[in-house]
């Protein structure tokens, strides 16, 4: 389960929704796009920010000068994110480290300890 309490099955169900139904489940905000594109981008509210209410997924599209095209691109991005989240998590199996890896780890720790011991200042009574 994730932050909003949905499982991968819930995301799979949402990803399979028709695009019109997915669009109705979203809040849309349009705004001026910034950046390259010149007057066509700066003078129209062509950029679209879309938020899927049920999941909280937020996507932005400012690729096109057409607001309609940017809405379609946002819906595609939301659907792709829903599909990505619908993949079931891999099953994990508990394993134990091998004897050889445990031995290597302890040898490395011992070697590191010796290196650090050599960095210490020699006390006056330890000389000899």
Image: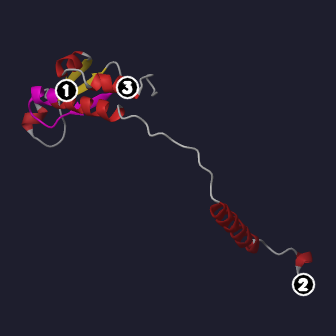
- Image check: 90 left or right of 49? right
Q: Residues within 10 Å of mark 2 (few under 14, many from 20)?
A: few
- Ranked by sequence position, the earlier of labels 1 and 3 is 3
Dot 1: what SS?
A: strand
Assess whether residue 58 is covered by the magenta stretch.
yes
Q: CA distance from mark 1 to mark 3?
A: 34 Å
Mark in the foreground, 2 or 3: 3
Which one is in front, 41 or 79?
Answer: 79
- Residue placed under numbered mark 1 in the picture: 31
Identify the image quadrant of the C terminus: bottom right
- Residue placed under numbered mark 2 in the picture: 128
- Residue placed under numbered mark 3 in the picture: 9
**Residue ID at (20%, 31%):** 76
In the image, is residue 78 above or below residue 91? above
**Residue ID at (11%, 30%):** 69
Dot 3: what SS?
A: helix
Q: Position of residue 22 (x, y in %)?
A: 23, 20
- Image check: 23 left or right of 104? left
Assess whether residue 63 is covered by the magenta stretch.
yes
**Residue ID at (74%, 71%):** 114
In the image, is residue 105 above or below residue 49? below
- The stretch in magenta equals 57-72
Dot 2: what SS?
A: loop
């Amino acid at each position: 389960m994730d932050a909003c309490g949905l499982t991968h099955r819930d995301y799979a169900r949402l990803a399979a929704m028709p695009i019109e139904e997915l669009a109705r489940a979203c809040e849309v905000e349009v705004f001026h796009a910034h950046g390259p594109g010149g007057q066509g981008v700066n003078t129209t509210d062509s950029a679209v920010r879309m938020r899927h209410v049920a999941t909280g997924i937020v996507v932005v599209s400012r690729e096109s000068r057409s607001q309609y095209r940017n809405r379609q691109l946002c819906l595609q991005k939301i659907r792709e994110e829903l599909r990505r989240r619908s993949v079931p998590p891999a099953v994990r199996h508990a394993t134990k480290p091998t004897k050889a890896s445990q031995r290597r780890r302890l040898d490395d720790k011992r070697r590191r300890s010796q290196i650090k011991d050599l960095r210490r200042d020699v006390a006056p009574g330890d000389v000899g």
